[in-house]
Amino acid sequence: MVIGNFQHKMAAHCESGTITSLLNHAGLEITEPLIFGISSGIFFGYFHKMKSFPFPTFIVRNKPGQMRKNIEKLLGVKFMNYTFKNPDSGIRKLDELLEQKIPTSAQVDYFYLDYVPSWERVHINVHFLIVIGKEGARYIISDSYFPKLVELDAISLKNARFAGGSMSPKGFLFHTTTIPVEIDFKTAITKGINKACFNMLNLPVPFLGVKGIRFFAKKIIDWPKLARDTEHLSHEIMKINILLEDQGTGGAGFRFIYATFLQQVAEKINKPELTDLSRQLMEIGDGWRELSLFAARIGKNRDLGPEKIKQLSDMIMDRAYVEEKFFKTLNSVIKRN
Amino acid sequence: MKEKEGYADFPEQQIILYVEKEDGKYGPIQTGSYLSANYIDDYFDKRRNLESALREQVISGKKSMIFYYMILEDLSLSELSSRVKINKSRVKKHLDANQFGKATAEELRRYANVFNIPVANLLQVILIRENDLYKTATEIDNKIKDNSLIQQVTNNPFVTETKIKECK
């Protein structure tokens, strides 16, 4: 059984892509950049020491699950959410929803998805996909990172949905229930931008927002001391490129998709200044991309001496400077009547 | 980023990039991963070297296969402990070859489940000969899917069916 009228679409990011597809299926025409922007997806956080990660890392989006919550709050759409203590109940519920022809999003650990190429598979508990059918012991899945529908056996899906560890999915499922007749997009967009600016500029924590980018620039100098050997350091430095470009960001750590959002909403909320700001953010994104390509290159060449790491650190620091300026301007534009 | 700069040829890993199109509008394009298109060989080289160094530590009696898979799958001690639901100090012991024997069969099943491997692979290293070199399937994948050797799960969580194909 497959929900035949579900339209599979690739997306830049799994959570914004999943929400977009579910809302589109329910009849709301909305783009992924709008979902990403309204839900204040753009962010930065650097984690130098965290028990769940074996090496320092960073994030370029808000907390997993937050996009869904923000969209619900700001657009007035309703999602039904489920978590399960017992895996068997979680499997039964998913099968029931599929029988009712309800496309259902599941939170999973990316590592257990057999259709993902081996070099991409990592233990990360916050991947979102949409299950749209079941044939025998195989589920039919719309995963926004893949050009076509994929299949996954029931055991792998169970392992992926009920993996333990930090941010454990606990079998989490959600699907759309209500789309309001009228949506106040102007207020939603304004609030979404306001929140994004607050998150980037004003969170009173040294490792989040623009402060987090500066913290990253300072702390990356210590990375050589934390690595097992040169190859490990090379791997971690090259991961900067993965986190910014390949791991579902739309390029440049979500800066390109947010620039697209600003361009798309400039007219909608009658703020022509946003068009110019979107251009500025595209250029800021080009700088992030330059940085990520530099990281890939020095990692590949094992050119990881103090000078090169310092150069990388300076490039990151420069991103903090331009982003601070950008978000301050965006904040003042959005607050102006 | 301009649209023409966004394209990379790597059909095995497609991504969506947001770019500036010719008409000045920003929007999505589907393209290959630039990193994989240009650096995937380097990833596999490093993976092979890491796998070989870890195997050496296991074979020499310093570390257990739990340590081997924990590092290979990029898990921290805390994360592994939380996933297998065994306290951290006990997991730490299981990483050591000399203390590994204290793990119960049930604990091994839990580790294998997290690593997505048969329980049997916590007790053995399988090397497959290819082009005069012996390599493990874990260099590339966590499940042995090589043509010459197939491991299949059974309804018994502790038993793996291993099929060896005749090489012609």
Image (cartoon, coloured by chain):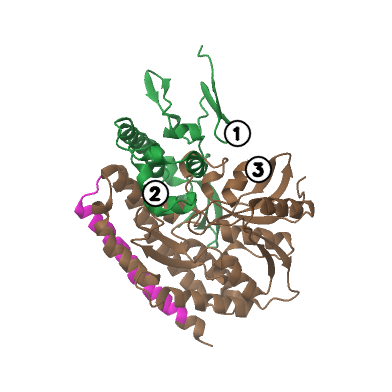
Chain colours: A brown, B green
Between B79 and A44, which is closer to the camera in this rendering? B79
Q: Which residue is mark 1?
A: B156
Secondary element at tag 2: helix
Please state which of the two labelled residues, at mark 3 or mark 1, is closer to the viewer: 1
Q: Mark 3 near mark 1, Cβ–Cβ under 8 Å?
A: no
Quarter occupied by the N terminus of chain B: bottom left
Alpha carbon of mark 2 to alpha carbon of mark 1: how far? Answer: 26 Å
Q: Where is B9 relative to A61, above or below?
A: above
Note whether residue A148 is visible: yes
Q: Position of residue B85 (x, y in %)?
A: 48, 52
Q: Where is A277 relative to A12, above or below?
A: below
Q: Label 3 is found on which chain of the structure?
A: A
Q: Which residue is mark 3?
A: A154
Query: What span is in magenta?
Result: A303-331
Note whether residue A151 is visible: no
Which mark sits nearer the N-terminus, 2 or 1? 2
Amino acid type, mark 1:
Asn
Q: Which residue is mark 2?
A: B90
Alpha carbon of mark 3 to alpha carbon of mark 2: how far? Answer: 31 Å
Q: Position of residue A110 (x, y in %)?
A: 53, 49
Q: Residues within 10 Å of mark 1 (few under 14, many from 20)?
A: few
Amino acid type, mark 2:
Arg
Residue furthest to the top:
B168
Give left or right: position of B28 versus A20: left
Amino acid type, mark 3:
Ala
Residue A321 on the magenta span:
yes
> What count of labels does the image hold?
3
Between B14 and B6, which is closer to the camera in this rendering? B14
Please state which of the two labelled residues, at mark 3 or mark 2, is closer to the viewer: 2
Q: Residues within 10 Å of mark 3 (few under 14, many from 20)?
A: some
Q: Position of residue A243 (x, y in %)?
A: 43, 54
